[in-house]
């Protein structure tokens, strides 16, 4: 069942969303060559503590990181560690927190240093644009898979692979709620969207084929062909006029 959130609940999710946004802003700035992904994790921990919030990921089904940091061919769920960022890398950072019982979740991909290739930059740009095209469809009266279709159509028009193995989700009192929000689907199908639904829309787009596999750490998802992958995510509320971005 897809829950409809009250005004008060939307306010609480938005509070959590502001903290997520703050963390991503800081990490984006901090992610320079030489910095390790563990350094970024520590920075996130500091802000989460100061904000009297809690990481939504740490301990989730045993996940060992406070955030997810996924480099280059890593799609999602990379674990912060000793790997130092190198010029030319692309880094996906995914942040989820809980505050006062409500969750928000957001991600972005950034180029590290100024030596990032044009093809990597294009993948990042298209993935971000795909997210916003999906968000535009998150209005009352539309169907859920209108969001999915907008993302898929745009990404595939650039020759990219749309990841099937991971999808977006409803969010609120839990990190993952109904419905699943795939980044692929048929326009005009799926549940009817209603004001007060809150969705984490999160395209994961691959430079090559859409298949992914999981590394031996049990978490890190990588592209099967080891080509690049990018990831953008926002937590959004459906309204009658336009989707409201809460992160
Ligand atoms: Mg996320
Ligand atoms: Mg998510």
Image (spheres, rainbow, N blue to C red):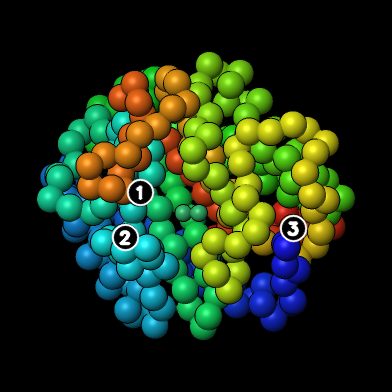
| Tag 1 secondary structure | loop
Q: Which mark is residue 22?
A: none
Q: Decide if residue 60 is on the left or right side of residue 148.
A: left
Question: Which of label 2 and label 3 is nearer to you?
Answer: 2
Which residue is drawn at the image coordinates 74% and 58% (left, top)? Answer: 238
Residue assigned mark 2: 63
Residue assigned mark 1: 77
Decide: few, some or many residues near mark 3? Use Cα within 10 Å; few <14, some 14-19, many ≥20: many
Residue 124 place in picture, x, y as percent: 44, 32
Lower position in the chain sequence, tag 2 or tag 3:
2
Instruction: State if disc 1 and disc 2 touch (CB < 8 Å).
Output: yes
Q: CA distance from mark 1 to mark 3?
A: 27 Å
Kindly indicate the quadrant of the structure image that contains residue 224: top left
Q: Is mark 2 within 8 Å of ligand 1?
A: no
Q: Decide if residue 87 is on the left or right side of residue 91.
A: left
| Tag 3 secondary structure | loop
Q: Quadrant of the N terminus?
A: bottom right
Residue 39 place in picture, x, y as percent: 19, 58
Q: Decide if residue 76 is on the left or right side of residue 215.
A: right
Q: CA distance from mark 2 to mark 3?
A: 30 Å
Vertical arrangement, residue 97 with respect to residue 188, above or below? below
Kindly indicate the quadrant of the structure image that contains residue 44: bottom left
Lower position in the chain sequence, tag 2 or tag 1:
2
Residue assigned mark 3: 238
Q: Quadrant of the C terminus?
A: bottom right
Q: Decide if residue 6 is on the left or right side of residue 104.
A: right
Say which of 4 and 12 sits in front: 4
Which residue is drawn at the image coordinates 49% and 42% (left, top)? Answer: 166
Residue 20 place in picture, x, y as percent: 45, 64
Lower position in the chain sequence, tag 1 or tag 3:
1
Which residue is drawn at the image coordinates 31% and 48% (left, top)? Answer: 219
């Amino acid at each position: 069942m897809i829950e409809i959130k009250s005004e008060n609940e939307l306010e609480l999710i938005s509070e959590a969303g502001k903290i997520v946004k703050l963390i991503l802003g800081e990490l984006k700035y901090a992610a320079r060559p030489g910095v390790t992904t563990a350094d970024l994790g520590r920075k996130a921990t500091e802000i989460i503590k100061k904000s009297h919030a809690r990481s939504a990921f740490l301990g989730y089904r045993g996940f060992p990181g406070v955030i997810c940091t996924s480099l280059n061919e890593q799609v999602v769920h990379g674990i912060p560690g000793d790997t130092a960022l190198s010029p030319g890398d692309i880094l996906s950072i995914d942040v989820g927190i809980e505050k006062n019982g409500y969750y928000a979740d957001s991600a972005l991909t950034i180029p590290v240093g100024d030596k990032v290739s044009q093809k990597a930059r294009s993948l990042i740009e298209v993935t971000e644009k795909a997210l916003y095209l999906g968000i535009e469809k998150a209005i009352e009266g539309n169907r859920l898979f209108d969001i999915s279709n907008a993302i898929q159509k745009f990404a595939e028009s650039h020759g990219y692979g749309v990841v099937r193995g991971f999808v977006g989700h409803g969010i609120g009192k839990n990190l993952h709620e109904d419905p699943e929000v795939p980044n692929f689907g048929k326009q005009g199908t799926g549940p009817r969207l209603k004001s007060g639904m809150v969705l984490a829309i999160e395209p994961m787009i691959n430079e090559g084929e859409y298949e992914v596999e999981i590394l031996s750490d049990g978490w890190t998802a990588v592209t099967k062909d080891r080509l690049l992958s990018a990831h953008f995510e926002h937590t959004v509320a459906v309204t009658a006029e336009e989707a409201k971005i809460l992160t």
